[in-house]
Image (cartoon, coloured by chain):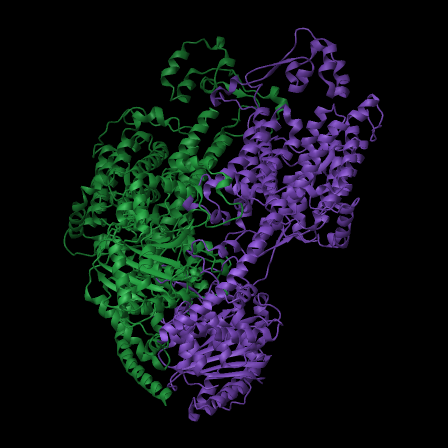
Chain colours: A purple, B green
Amino acid sequence: TTITLSLDEHNRLLSKHQNILPTQNFITVYLAILRHILREEDEPTPTLFTEMDTLQYEGGEMEWKESARWVKFEEKVEEGGERWSKPHVSTLSLHSLFELRTCLQTGCVLLDLEGYSLPQIVDDIIEKQVQEGLIAPEIREKISFVLLRKHRHQTKKPIHRSLADIGKSSPSNHSPSPSPRSGSGFHRSTEDLRARESGSLSKLRESGLLCLPPSIDLSTTTSGSLEFLISLKNKFMKKIPRDAEASNVLIGEVDFLDKPFVAFVRLAQAATLGGLTEVPVPTRFLFVLLGPDGKTKSYNEIGRAMATLMVDDLFSDVAYKARDREDLIAGIDEFLDEVIVLPPGEWDPKIRIEPPKKLPSAEMRKSVFSLNELGQPNGNAGGGAASAEDEEMPAPHELGEELKFTGRFCGGLWLDIKRKVPWFLSDFYEGFHIQSISAVLFIYLGCITNAITFGGLLGDATDNYQGVMESFLGTALAGTVFCLFGGQPLIILTGHPIRLWVGLHSCLQCLILVATDASYIIKYMTRFTEEGFSSLISFIFISDALKKMMSIFNYYPINPDFNPDYITSYRCDCQAPDQVSPLALNVSSPLGLENISDYSMFNFSSLDWNQLSKKECLRFGGSLVGKSCKYVPDLAMLSFILFFGTYSMTISLKKFKASRYFPTKCRTLLADFSIIVSILVFCALDYVMSLDTPKLHVPTQIKPTRPDRGWIVMPFGKNPWWMCLASFVPALLVTILIFMDQQITAVIMNRKENKLKKGCGYHLDLFWVGILMAVCSFMGLPWYVAATVISIAHIDSLKMESESSAPGEQPQFLGVREQRLTGILVFVLTGVSVFLAPILQYIPMPVLYGVFLYMGVASLHGIQFWERMKLFLMPAKHQPDFVFLRHVPLRRVHLFTLVQITCLAVLWILKSTVAAIIFPVMILGLMVVRKTLDLVFSQHDLAWLDDILPDKDKKKKEDEKKKKEKKKAKSEEHNNSDEEVRTTTIRCVRC
Amino acid sequence: TTITLSLDEHNRLLSKHQNILPTQNFITVYLAILRHILREEDEPTPTLFTEMDTLQYEGGEMEWKESARWVKFEEKVEEGGERWSKPHVSTLSLHSLFELRTCLQTGCVLLDLEGYSLPQIVDDIIEKQVQEGLIAPEIREKISFVLLRKHRHQTKKPIHRSLADIGKSSPSNHSPSPSPRSGSGFHRSTEDLRARESGSLSKLRESGLLCLPPSIDLSTTTSGSLEFLISLKNKFMKKIPRDAEASNVLIGEVDFLDKPFVAFVRLAQAATLGGLTEVPVPTRFLFVLLGPDGKTKSYNEIGRAMATLMVDDLFSDVAYKARDREDLIAGIDEFLDEVIVLPPGEWDPKIRIEPPKKLPSAEMRKSVFSLNELGQPNGNAGGGAASAEDEEMPAPHELGEELKFTGRFCGGLWLDIKRKVPWFLSDFYEGFHIQSISAVLFIYLGCITNAITFGGLLGDATDNYQGVMESFLGTALAGTVFCLFGGQPLIILTGHPIRLWVGLHSCLQCLILVATDASYIIKYMTRFTEEGFSSLISFIFISDALKKMMSIFNYYPINPDFNPDYITSYRCDCQAPDQVSPLALNVSSPLGLENISDYSMFNFSSLDWNQLSKKECLRFGGSLVGKSCKYVPDLAMLSFILFFGTYSMTISLKKFKASRYFPTKCRTLLADFSIIVSILVFCALDYVMSLDTPKLHVPTQIKPTRPDRGWIVMPFGKNPWWMCLASFVPALLVTILIFMDQQITAVIMNRKENKLKKGCGYHLDLFWVGILMAVCSFMGLPWYVAATVISIAHIDSLKMESESSAPGEQPQFLGVREQRLTGILVFVLTGVSVFLAPILQYIPMPVLYGVFLYMGVASLHGIQFWERMKLFLMPAKHQPDFVFLRHVPLRRVHLFTLVQITCLAVLWILKSTVAAIIFPVMILGLMVVRKTLDLVFSQHDLAWLDDILPDKDKKKKEDEKKKKEKKKAKSEEHNNSDEEVRTTTIRCVRC
């Protein structure tokens, strides 16, 4: 622990920055040191919270005032604004880092000091300095006095107090010319409060301190106000990890010193040193820099550099484990080596850099550094360095062991069950969260809208053998069972029309697929197929929503020639028919069987035709005559407003999450409930307008739609026996469709991006789908299979983000609330919808169509295919920095996208024509197209744009292995030649 | 020029980073050098374009391939993507900078080399190196061979060619495993093309080059394809300043060297060295780094560091003026000193940093550096360093000499005229720009909407003595004259109702105000008054737009009980009155005087009442009976859709400017025409719906609205003579209102942020307003005065941004197209609107109300008061980094905002009650309120939130002066003491 600046030191510092040039062999010195330190113990060191206090002169008195703090990023006290700045990346000057390095070289370093109170620690520091001859013994007491001055922290004030202050503070408090040292009402009142709390005792002690007995424990003076501070800082404490320790940086300018007084202290045990730190976190490190007058800026910069180093993952490790001064210096050198430099002409140092979204982890940095390879800055203009390119290959397509082919009977299913059972309990209690309410309501509305629309169509197609009621009951039954026992309970099921025998065959086929682990072929479903399918479904969803909206315009036609002045000419009269045939009556009104008896007694000639409503008039065979008969005013327009309003309000509320207004919690809640809020708002609007818009009408009684059938369908009905066998063929198509629908949706749900933790169960899913198919078939209910878009909406509405992290750190996406509760609730609610009818009837259909439009659009979000489609409209220079664009030429990207678009267009056309029946087979076709793409695109391009097919993947891995081996051999060679070069160059310079 | 690494060098480098510590005295060495260099000549040096080429091995052949380029920011060739990356800030490693420094210390530096061709230059470099013993003479030819390899540039390919390529490239072109060195179709075809162009001759030469005669001029080989390249690079050339010169950085790895070969060359004259540079810009600097195998990454990083240095404003200056190696090293040291350092744990080096919006200018950096004060990084946690705080005071409120009180009769007016005359011609030709079309149409529509609404109200208020026609003519007349001769022709005038004598008095009063330079009192109008007034006007605008929209709902009521089934019951019949009085007829229909004669011949009893329209029915005294009489369907809803649609589409199109889609030009055009596009779209929608929405109906004939008056009003009419004198009193109120309206609007227009260059003319403005008042009074037209919101919209629609700047540089706001043409055109168009009636009648009023809403909202944009109001809703940590928030405590900011809100609320209430007449005086009241704020807020706070009032300002300046003098004295003292400290500390360490 000498403090002279040796020339060797200089050499070492400089030499390590000369990698390609002669003195290269020195670089290993500090790396060896660091490796030694960091390998000693592997237990993780605590996180450090750093506070920097500067010495202030307030009305002739000195005190330490908090000026910045670091949890991970820097927060500065805005002197004028009296508040914390936004957390930002600490931008340092190279200068201050070098100065800090010299400070540590020349100053006093005390490692593992036994310290329990600040005065004792200060004593020890000063003693050491005097011993080493760094300071004259005369100023000992002066320094001690300065270091024991009281600490004032920047505290966040409750709003009601600061409002009360507004009245208080008058200009007399402010000196007319701006003086940064003048105290403002804010601090004073905090001060007052603290003074009142600690009472006159502390005042006495303070005056006692003026007499300079350094043994007086200042910590007790401020400990009275500690609890008060804790309550204020409650919120901030949440941002600091539990095991955190503090490091305190004290920077000051005094007039009695003629050279800097520097001390770096590490305590043997972290200790709470009274009011030293703003939060009740024990202090482990202390850095003191007192210097002669006139260099405040420099001192502050050095302090910031120290504080930034202390919160650096690697340096803090070094600081904890350092054995001597040399180790600390090596730590700084390592830090300097990794530092990122911005040229002064391309960046304004006044800009506060917002914390990045992602940071390289300390582990990565450590490993990089232990490999003795420097991190490569982004701008690397390097040409074709093969090694760099290899590293940058995307992670291979992983589907995990769920899709392994076991080769055993029901092997996959058995594994699925084994995997899911341990989670079964947590699947319920993890559902209790406010977010679940929103998810349940949202998905419930989606499901019943679907059930009603689908049920209506189904009823028309099946002569009401299956209608709205069946649709509701089926959804409830199948959904509940699936969510209770399915492999991926986040999947929401939707209906398909059925025939009993086809259903039974399909069920059997599904079970066979389950038993034979057939789902493993999903491995061949790459991003190409997956995104193609889900985009198609999304487009269908969007187009359906729009079509339904447009149908309202047809249903409620607008009179384009309406002129307010001719209001007198618009009317619609019911004219009596010339001859009334009672027979025609019965036929034309199948729906009003009960009522007809009331009217049939009427004498038709005496009927007041003018008093009849439109329906009545038509029923009695009258005809409507008049200009306004065809038209319905306002309803279409209002429907459009409701539709578009719901959609855009939902979008806006979702976006509002990223706005600056209101606290984060409010915004998160609002974003989570955006759909519910939008629906409520537009239902209210509809209610206020009190127009007769089409409403959501659910059945009010549980009974089969067609009154002439029961709940059980007999297996052998009117159909001939051979139909039972022949239905095998259509069943095959159905099986393919159901298999594809179900498994692609499952793949989408299980995407790595969703960070699911409970594993998936493709076989189990299919098993239940098959079983439910049979059950539904017997009950005459529709079949149920995963609904892609609604399932995506379900998962979206259950996403979790990390809440408390270091100030400035971006909240991280943590995963999805994986549980069965929301799903079950949705379907139970669907089942009891008949009782909810009185509430549901206030919801206008256009609002629900708006929700559908939103679901369709939202499910396109984050699909790479969609991002690539947008690229067509962007000039190259404006394109986002997608990683695949860095590696694949744009025209190849476009070609790939074009292929996908073509496929989807073909599928779309197929779907809309009679060929719809082979639609499921065509989806399989997508996979074939993907296979042929192997011939058009290089595996390199496909690895970036898509995933590599499993077999190819294997091959590639083997290739890579071979390559690596080669490289290894080569690099060894290299190292040798490196060694040679080094020695020769050294020789060359020395001669 | 020795190349040994002396220890002195080491010391110097290190020592300059020890500011607060002993060896500080060395720091002055390089500063002295730099000051000497940069002061020698003051002529500016050309801008440098830097290209970095790396040596590549392509199928056994070597060639130089462009890997990055710098205009100001770095653009990298994305190897895989075969395209330019987005421009970004070059992030360097400290390492590479130190290595570069050593390279320049040890390598060969050739300054002012006479060079005309690459081979000759290469020869000279090698000769020099051999002379200095840096390389063995044997490898001379090998190096020359490498350095003369052909250069391949990353060219942007026209889209049709790249599309054609899509078909061509098949996977056979790609090796199955990714190999970064494998050529792709892209480069090959460029290659082919160039080969075809330069013909077989070049091939011969190339093979000739293999025999290594270094005198062969490679430049002719590639000059053939130069023109081709130029055409391709046309677009990129625009980004490079005209006087630019190039610096080329060549980085390569070769196997025959055992230590790096480094050369830095500055040519005496910039020369075009064939295909060396991708653009036809002459080369001035050349940096070559060839090194032994295995360190490609390091070499590339050094090359990037060199390139970044070359585009640094300060270093490029040094490079141009350097006298020797030492100067260059000093330049690097200076660069290192200014460098901004990001800690590795808080930033991911892989993130490409987008260029900042604003950069510190080179001049500022130079001046900072010549003052020997280091730039202070943003995070400065420094406490109350008084000097820092002083520097950060906002620039004082400047109004320029336009508002000086001359003390002479018409002195200000005369100065105004003198100031404006030189610009008169340019005021016309500068108006020819496509942007003007949009501005004219937009403002024109605003003006006529205003004229019609205002004219209608006016007509009601004045018994049609002044009506829509007068409003149109007056707008046209006053506007044209004002725009032709006014002081600030960007101001748009709007009407006020008049009386002849009041007008004459007001005119006289205005002229007196002009003659006495009374406008100078505007100096006392600070941001507080200005923003208060303009916000108030904006709020009125917004509320008017909404009110007008809501009135449509009243005008076309919706039938809330409509039920489509009861369509038969909705009708509206005209019922004949019991007794028809022909007298009543005439009175109730003043508008249909011509038609009445047609009907008066009818026999009333035989009239078919059912055939009458609503108006006719009412005219003939019939009454309307029926459920649908009160209601008008669809119109209100459609109007709302048109209103809201126009508004939100305009907002979206404006925002679209910042999106990624389409080239910048398209987006700028679309943003400029956003209002016109929105209007057209919703007019089209309205046309398609073909409903009878309220339309814009302008008069079709030029004649006074009231047929019984002429165009000239006689001064002595029916009124008693004393009225002529008594009207002095109301005239005074009018004068105040007009004065305030006019001058505040002018102040808003002349804001510093608008960067107007042609000066303002407050006196001239008021002069013309006065004159026009008299003219309008005599003609019975309304008076005209500046319309705040429309004027702001006018200036907004004429904003200019810089087009061609270095890639990545943000387009700068350059100012406003200051000219008279758009204004004149608007008013001429208004005058001829009568002829445009057939076109204008297609524009629905709700669309125009939407435009008004947009104008009102847009004029709030950028008003600090509005920004401060938003702060109420934001938690402190989310608030934007406004500069005033850094200096004024949040609660003071809130208090200030609350005062403003209260003032506006009072004004709003006044405006809506009978007290409206003293409204103009109340605006003067705003200035009084501001004056009293001096008692509540400190001048420091006010300087940030508002401006300081002129007198206070003067006082403050004096204060500052005094302070500065004091400080100066003190700092001199300081320097001395500094000197002392320094010597003592040096002594201390040396002992």
Is residue B958 at all visible to an observer of this figure? no
Q: Is residue A679 above or below residue B77?
A: above
Residue A248 at least partly seen: yes
The answer to which quarter of the image holds residue B851 is: top left
Question: Percent x, y for residue A454?
Answer: 68, 31
Number of numbered discs visible in the structure rendering:
0
Q: Where A246 sits versus B406, above or below?
A: below
Foreground of the two, A973 or A678: A973
Q: Nearer the viewer, residue B123 or A303?
A: B123
Quadrant of the rendering where the C terminus of chain A is positioned: bottom left
* Residue B35 x, y percent position in the rendering: 24, 70
x 24%, y 32%: residue:
B718
Q: Residue at x 47, y 87 (%)?
A: A144
Q: Nearer the viewer, residue B223 or A724?
A: B223
Q: Residue furthest top?
A: A579
Q: Quadrant of residue B34?
A: bottom left
In the image, taking residue B123 as reference, residue A642 lies left or right, namely: right
Instruction: Locate residue A549: give its quadrant.
Output: top right
Q: x, y (%) of residue A47?
A: 57, 70
Q: Position of residue A38 (x, y in %)?
A: 57, 73
Closer to us: B103 or A79: B103
